[in-house]
Image: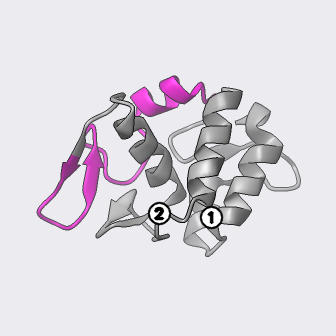
């Protein structure tokens, strides 16, 4: 993953601007960690953000996982669910988020393992 994008993402996760949610990028203003990256990309004009009637926000029509456009912009090597290929973790960021790992803890994972993402 691109170092600057990784640090930007980690900073956003630690900013307190994004209430944490689960199972969708952004549902009712609560974000998955991947939704935070998608929202940062939308703020930079990389993807579009659209409020859906179901209460979720879509980024380039995606409501649950990272779009190819976001992954490419961020320089991510892994898949749509935020792969972290480190033996000690061997989980996706989506999985960590949905199991209750806090945004500051996820930010630490990103800061420590950005090169393998």
Please indicate, yes or no, whether residue 72 appears anywhere in the rendered image. yes
Q: Position of residue 42 (x, y in %)?
A: 35, 38
In the figure, 117 relative to 112: above or below? above
Q: Position of residue 83 (x, y in %)?
A: 65, 44
Q: Residue furthest right?
A: 88
What's the distance in space between the residues labelled 2 and 1, CA to CA? 9 Å
Horizontal relation, residue 56 to residue 94: left or right: left
Are discs 2 and 1 less than 8 Å apart at CB? Answer: yes
Q: Residues within 10 Å of mark 1 (few under 14, many from 20)?
A: many
* Of 94 and 74, the residue lying toward us: 74
* Of 47 and 100, the residue lying toward us: 47
Question: Quick check: is 78 in the magenta stretch?
Answer: no
Question: Quick check: is 56 in the magenta stretch?
Answer: yes
Q: Residue at x 77, y 55 (%)?
A: 108
- Quadrant where the N terminus is found in the figure: top right
Q: Which residue is mark 1?
A: 103
* Of 43 and 67, the residue lying toward us: 43
- Magenta-drawn segment: 50-77
Of circles 2 and 1, the one toward us is: 2
Mark 1: secondary structure: helix
Q: Residue at x 66, y 29 (%)?
A: 4
In the figure, 39 relative to 57: above or below? above
Q: Residue at x 54, y 47 (%)?
A: 81
- Quadrant where the C terminus is found in the figure: top right
Q: Which residue is mark 2?
A: 18
Say whether disc 2 or disc 1 marks the residue closer to the N-terminus: 2
Q: Residue furthest bottom?
A: 100
Horizontal relation, residue 34 to residue 11: left or right: left
Q: Residue at x 58, y 59 (%)?
A: 15
Question: Tag on residue 80?
Answer: none
Mark 2: secondary structure: loop
């Amino acid at each position: 993953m691109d170092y600057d994008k990784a640090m930007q993402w980690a900073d956003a996760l630690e900013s307190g601007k994004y209430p944490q949610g689960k199972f969708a990028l952004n549902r009712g203003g609560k974000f998955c960690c991947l939704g935070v990256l998608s929202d940062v990309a939308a703020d930079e004009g990389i993807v579009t953000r659209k409020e859906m009637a179901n209460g979720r926000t879509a980024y380039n029509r995606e409501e649950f996982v990272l779009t190819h456009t976001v992954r490419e912009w961020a320089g991510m090597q892994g898949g749509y669910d935020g792969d972290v290929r480190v033996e000690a973790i061997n989980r996706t960021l989506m999985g960590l988020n949905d199991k209750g790992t806090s945004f500051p803890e996820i930010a630490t994972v990103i800061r420590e393992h950005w090169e393998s993402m």
